[in-house]
Image (tube, helix red, strand yellow):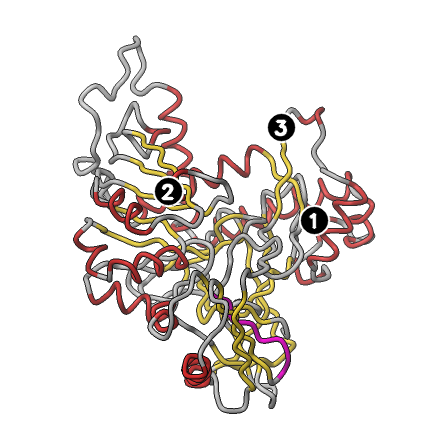
Amino acid sequence: MRFDFSVLPIKNRAFSEKPMTFIDPSPKNFLGAIVDLVMIETGNPTAREHWQHKQLHNLLQHAAQRSAFWRKRIGAKKIKDINLSDLPVLTRGEVVKQVAAEGCLLTTGDSIRTKNDSTSGSSGTPVHFFISEMNTHYNVVRSAAQYFIEGRDLTRNRTQLYYKSTTHENGFAVVKKDNWLSDLGALIKSGKNKQIDYFNPNSALLCEELRLDPIGYLVAGPYIVEAILQHSGCEFFRNAGTALWIPIGYSASPQLRDMFSSIGVPVRAHYSCREMGMIGSECEEVPGHYHITTSNVIVEMKYDDNIQIGGKRLGRVLVTHLHSYATPFIRYDIGDLASMTDACSCGHAGPVLANIHGRTKQLLKHPDGRLSPFYIVGKEMSGIAEFTEYRIRQTAIDIIVVEICGRESLTPDEISAFSDLIKSHASGEFKIDVQAVSKIDWGQNIKRLGFHNEVL
């Protein structure tokens, strides 16, 4: 091992001009935090496990002191003698009850700022909870750390597209910064940052905006990426200088990944949830395998339900957020299915998740009880008829409803074509109900998933 920063884009006047000082405190502390996280996640496994064990006990001690709800769950056993498997699984409903009854477990006396947060509601009713300023800081540091872990070129631009339900001219608003790695701005020169908040954007004008500067690292949900693909095709992203696509919100379908692979643009997803931030980062060498962010979480698998998808045995994903002092998440069932191994075939010596399936996002339940992945690419839908948006739902064990928005009616041929498309991705055992609707009731689901399972 050697330290070599020759490839790091250090600024010409990066080092401090103060006497007896190498680097000014702010960028040095941020860089130091990155080093901390990388060392925990990629260093000595025994040291990492010891650190996690101590962090868990610190969190349990805090929860037991502040919460009657958690005292009951932890029981009379001494904190130092507790293993995770001793504790019951935490459900969304139980989090809702704890927050409603007890509020935030950090107080003004702790001198740590907190704020309300909530999930998007894509799996049902939004879960409201509290986070601390440490959680926000961790998420920023961990996001930056991934660029260092993979040795990405920091001088490339970063382009972020976020869905925001606000009104803007042309359906989107743009904010630009000269340096996307702003917390290290005094030390390291990074590319430009462009954040685009959109809501029903004008696709032609959005593409025109994206062409103004090389896209670089694209941080965007599959929903908006599909919309751009429908308007401008896959080559647009290569011609606009896309170096890497980081999907957010929900997973990219295999078809979308193949499209980007065909133009030489890699896809590197994060596995995360609103309640705790990043849970895993996709391996550079083994797509679909996620190195668990052990500096943030402990992940367990619960295999009690004997679920198999594609011949692989999967379990429920239970996550313990080691820094969740405002609202504890300990053995939290996030509603996903996956498999887990102790190491990755790339050589990474840490736990790895694979075969990840969101229970209500991209799984069909068949009448015989089987579960299977279900992916529809927006381009397949738009190739049949013109519309503004669509939604596909499994509403019963043998019924799939297809809502086509922006059409007063559909022709018999269009209904038949939509039905045949769905059956080709599912099977003939489902009844397909194709409906023209004036508006889709997304409720509180800001993710607007193209497919949603109401049976699981």
What is the x, y in percent for residue 236? Answer: 21, 56
What span is colored magenta in the figure? 390-397
In the rendering, which numbered label is found on residue 80? 1
Residue at (68% x, 43% y) in the render: 327
- Residue type, label 3: Ile
Q: Nearer the viewer, residue 48 or 99?
A: 99
Residue 350 magenta-highlighted: no
> Which quadrant of the figure has residue 179?
top left
Between marks 2 and 1, how big is the CA–CA gap?
A: 58 Å
Per the rendering, the mark at residue 335 is: none
Above-or-below relation of 403 to 440:
below
Q: Give the residue at mark 2.
A: 170
Can residue 186 be seen here? The reply is yes
Q: Nearer the viewer, residue 111 or 175?
A: 175
Q: Earlier in the sequence, mark 2 or mark 3?
A: 3
Count residues near mark 3 (Cα–Cα under 10 Å), then give few for <14, some for 14-19, many for 20+.
few
Is disc 1 placed on a helix, strand or loop? helix
Give the residue type that dot 2 points to. Answer: Asn
Residue on which the image places disc 3: 112
Q: Quadrant of the C terminus?
A: bottom right
Residue 166 vs residue 74: left or right?
Answer: left
Tell me the amino acid under the disc marked 1.
Lys
In the image, residue 391 lies in the stretch drawn in magenta:
yes
Q: Nearer the viewer, residue 270 or 374?
A: 374
